């Protein structure tokens, strides 16, 4: 079933506007609250019967009829929200947002497309190591607002830790200096719980980029409703909560270790001799987080740039200019040599 929300005022396709936090109609300017959008009356629908599935060498493709203009919409097997490439109408593929595939929560977009483009523009102006012609020559190929599927995990952690530590005291009596070393055997046992550790469940999004876009502010998290996706792209999770568990577990493990380790302080030396963490997973919640993805071309190579669609935090790859790199390194080494000369003079 393909679904396109329509404006209750004029009947045109209507999209979610992140800045307003509401559905806003581009044609008549009407504002509608997300919870007031009604799938039954305020949308066009096409039956899933007219979806055809093609298995090709590129994987599996589905095609749907745009419920606004009737053109064919091609999607890959994971897409759950997209736009008709002919009329631009938002198209939501309902059976990929239902049942097991229905997200529990969503963080809606707060930045719109113009704001994401501005982030890119000011970043190209600031780039320290960017070739000077970059800002003139980089062309943005595409910009997409994507709701990326994430699993959020809750864990209870129990850590047992043992350590050897010393405390060293020095004192001087007359001409003699005495060193007192006290040795300690340390035992620690802590319980901790961690809520909503995220791991992205999308095969398309590079994990390191998604990690760098964190943190998302969970205060904006709200119960999932389909209209939030109207006007954006989204996909259903590619990896199940079992498949992604290891990534979140690794983080929970290192948080718990650090927390326990940090309780041992005030010693001259600390050596962890044994540490064991047991984790219990309580819950995994399926959510969608907002990301603007820009693809840009520079000297015939493709790069990408990502913006956290909620907080505006950016992650980008800049082309490096050889000339500027050389200058930069020269600067550092010249600086270090100066310091060494200074020490040399003092000794
Ligand atoms: Zn309207
Ligand atoms: Zn269309």
Image (tube, rainbow, N blue to C red):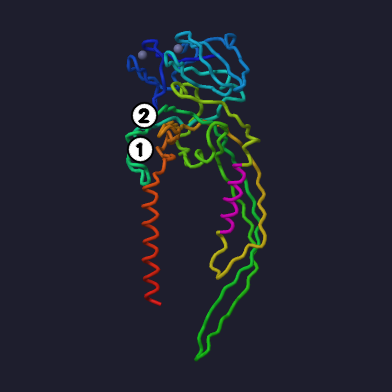
Q: Residue furthest bottom?
A: 174
Comparing 8 with 68, the one in front is: 68
User: Which residue lies under the disc numbered 1?
Assistant: 134
Q: In the rendering, at what x and y percent does residue 62 appear?
A: 58, 16
SS label for mark 2: loop
Report the image quarter containing ligand 2.
Answer: top left
Q: Which residue is mark 2?
A: 19
Q: Position of residue 335 (x, y in %)?
A: 37, 61
The magenta-colored residue range is 247-261
Percent position (x, y) of residue 287? 54, 31
Question: How far apart are the alpha carbons under marks 1 and 2?
Answer: 30 Å
* Residue 270 in view in this figure: yes
Mark 1 or mark 2: name the one nearer the start of the chain: 2
Q: Nearer the viewer, mark 1 or mark 2?
A: 1
Name the residue at 39% across, 72% down: 343
- Judge from the rendering whether residue 41 lies leftward or rightward of residue 103; answer left or right: left
Q: At x 52% / y 10%, what residue is drawn?
A: 65
In the picture, the quarter occupied by the C terminus is bottom left
């Amino acid at each position: 079933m393909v679904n396109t929300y329509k404006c209750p005022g004029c009947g045109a396709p209507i999209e979610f506007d992140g800045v307003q936090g509401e559905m806003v109609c581009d044609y008549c300017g009407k504002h509608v609250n997300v919870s007031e959008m009604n799938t039954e009356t305020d949308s066009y629908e096409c039956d899933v019967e007219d979806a055809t599935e093609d298995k090709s060498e590129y994987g599996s493709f589905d095609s749907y009829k745009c419920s606004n203009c009737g053109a064919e919409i091609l999607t890959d097997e994971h897409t759950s929200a997209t736009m008709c490439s002919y009329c631009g109408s938002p198209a939501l593929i309902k059976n990929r947002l239902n049942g097991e595939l229905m997200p529990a929560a969503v963080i809606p977009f707060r930045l719109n497309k113009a704001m994401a483009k501005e982030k890119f523009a000011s970043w190209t102006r600031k780039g320290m190591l960017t070739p000077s012609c970059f800002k003139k020559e980089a062309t943005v190929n595409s910009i997409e607002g994507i709701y990326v599927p994430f699993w959020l995990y809750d864990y209870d952690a129990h850590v047992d830790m043992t350590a050897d530590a010393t405390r060293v005291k020095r004192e001087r009596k007359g001409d003699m200096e005495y060193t007192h070393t006290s040795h300690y055997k340390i035992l620690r046992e802590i319980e901790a719980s961690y809520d909503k550790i995220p791991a992205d469940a999308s095969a398309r999004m590079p994990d390191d980029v998604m990690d760098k876009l964190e943190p998302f502010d969970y205060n904006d998290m709200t119960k999932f409703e389909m209209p939030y996706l109207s006007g954006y792209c989204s996909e259903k999770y590619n990896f199940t909560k079992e498949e992604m568990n290891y990534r979140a577990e690794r983080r929970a493990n290192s948080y718990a270790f650090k927390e326990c380790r940090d309780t041992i302080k005030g010693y001259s030396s600390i050596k962890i001799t044994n540490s064991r963490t047991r984790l219990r997973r309580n819950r995994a919640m399926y959510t969608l987080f907002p990301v603007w993805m820009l693809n840009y071309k520079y000297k015939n190579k493709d790069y990408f740039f990502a913006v956290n669609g909620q907080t505006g935090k950016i992650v980008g790859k800049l082309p490096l200019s050889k000339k500027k790199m050389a200058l930069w390194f020269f600067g550092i080494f010249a600086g270090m040599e100066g310091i060494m000369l200074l020490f040399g003079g003092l000794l």
